[in-house]
Image (spheres, helix red, strand yellow):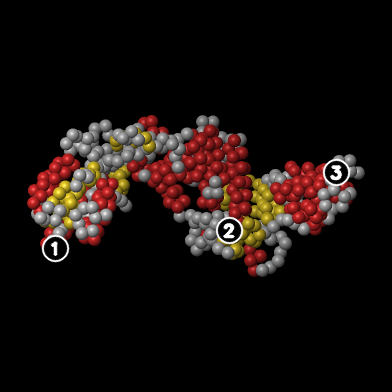
Amino acid sequence: MNQRIRCAIYTRKSSDDGLDQEFNSLDAQHEACAAYVTSQRGEGWSLLPARYDDGGVSGGTLERPALYRLMEDVDAGRIDMIVVYKIDRLTRSLSDFARLVDRFEAADCSFVSVTQAFNTSSSMGRLTLNMLLSFAQFEREVTAERIRDKIAASKKRGLWMGGVSPLGYDAHPDPNTRSLVINEAERSTVERLFALYEALGCLRAVKQQADRLGLRSKRHSFSTGRVQGGGKLSRGQIHYILCNPIYAGRIRHKDKIFDGLHPAIIDDALWDCVQVRLQAASARPRTNGKSVDHQHGANVASPLTGKFRDATGDRLTPSHTQKGRARIRYYVSNRLLSGAKDPSGWRLPAAAFETSVANTVANHLDQAARRHALLEHPEVRAGEDHVELGQALAARLRTSDVGTLSDLVREGHLDRGRITIHLNSAMLANVLDIDPSALAREALTCTAPFDLRRRGVETKIIVGDVFCGPDHVLLRGLAKGHKWAAELQSGTPISVIAKRERVTEAYIRPRAQLAYLTPRIQTAILDGSLPPELTLETLVRARLPLDWRVQERMLGFESARPGAA
């Protein structure tokens, strides 16, 4: 008697087509393999009852449920022979097949194809199999190259090669026409996004406006019933739309762009303008808290370089200090760079100064636009357009658009207590789409109060109305002072309070005395009108007396005290 050989049949089909039929391709493969096993009954072959069928799974991967169960049974020693209809039913990859054969041999299992006269139980069978798989792989690669060449040739002719249609377009209703037609309901969304970026020049600002206007992404309904899209546009989606040449009537294939057969939504002038601005924005240095590279685009990293002078006529020059990996930028009066000490010189934190200048200019443009004061002779019909354009430019400045700030500010002057900024008439006129001579002279210059004060270790630039808001550290100190003073008055020992708060008694005493500040000083702390230089540390170290009149005199409040002589 021959030894019994336990056989398992494995079947696979790449697509789901026809699998719902009563007798499908998997059944046909299984029937042919079962007949072959029956023909080998004299050799001791017997068919195992379990079926291993993978329907709708590619042979290019080993991640297949039935194959996974088959290999588990092989490793467990429950199978002696694997029977398939054709080699490529098991795998289409030569490397994957080599790994499978290694596992077969480790489990003393063989492999046979019923339509190809060989099996892996012999060396000749393994050689033949490797040759067949090599030719199969070669055929797949040639087919893939042919498909890629066909797609490239079709796109070169401007044809749409299928896939999910982009926002603003639908596939042509004629399936034989490889092109796109404009979706009029979505067209306005695309046009609005391009117009917003042309006006704002900042993706973050465009997204904010798109959310406010209720703009949505394209909604797709697939044949499976799955629905995708229709939500708010992300910054990534907006950037992809702005960069997609499909909207200019073109087709992209890898790094090449061809004229398409579909109609354009965006005209060439607007498309080119947006691409130039996107390219300029992508070239700006992004620090993310790390040091700024001053070797590339220094005028962008410090957009106000060479534009401001102090009261002596000395230019403010970019400088920096290194703190770990961070580079902290400043604008410094040029004479201070040589080490000279001059109290009239300026040393301004760069980021705060740039923000202050941008906000000052933005407020000036916003107010001038609202008052229709941008033009020397306002035009009735174009007035609202100029208002919108002026306000859009102001919005760009408030979004830290350093490129716009650098282009718009022509020069400026710093005096003690005042800043004066002169604007670039050519740039402003270009934004408003008018001749520079039509601009009002008052629109090109803005002034505002300016001061530099210290609050603790922090330097604050104060522009406009001097209002810094409440000092939260001082507010917390005042609240704790009232709490500790009340506890001390109720008889709680100071040592108990210090132990509970995990501080020393010397820490508690001066802070508890904050509860006895005059009502005017405490009100100033609460509403934020206390001078910035009066910090918690200043009040604690001052050792203020209990006499309210002396307190106010020491802190500069006496002259404004109601009822003072």
Amino acid type for the residue under numbered disc 2: Gly
Q: Residue 450 or 236: which is nearer the viewer?
A: 236
Of the image marks 1 and 2, the number of the one nearer the N terminus? 1
Q: Residue at x 12, y 48 (%)?
A: 37
Q: How far from the left and from the top, in percent, is residue 362?
A: 59, 44
Mark 2 burial class by Cα count in 10 Å: few <14, some 14-19, many 20+:
some
Dot 2 falls on a residue whose secondary structure is loop
Say which residue label 3 marks. Answer: 561
Q: Is residue 361 left or right of residue 551?
A: left
- Can you give x and y, in whole percent of width and height, for residue 129 in the image? 15, 57
Q: What SS does tag 3 mark?
A: loop
Earlier sequence position, callout 1 versus callout 3: 1
Q: Which residue is mark 1?
A: 123
Q: Which mark is residue 51?
A: none
Say what secondary structure mark 1 lies in: helix
**Between marks 2 and 3 in the image, the one whose residue lies nearer the viewer:** 3
Report if the CB atoms under discs 1 and 3 are less than 8 Å apart: no
Residue type at numbered disc 3: Arg
Q: CB atoms at circles 1 and 2 under 8 Å apart?
A: no
Distance CA(mark 1)–CA(mark 2): 81 Å
In-front residue for pair 316/166: 166
Q: Which numbered mark, 1 or 3, is in the foreground of this view? A: 1
Residue drawn 58% across the image and 64% down it: 324
79 or 531: nearer the viewer: 79
Q: Amino acid at mark 1?
A: Ser
Real-space Cα distance between discs 1 and 3? 108 Å
Q: Circle 2 sits on which residue? A: 306
Mark 3 is surrounded, within 10 Å at the Cα level, by few (under 14), some (14 to 19) or many (20 or more) other residues, namely few
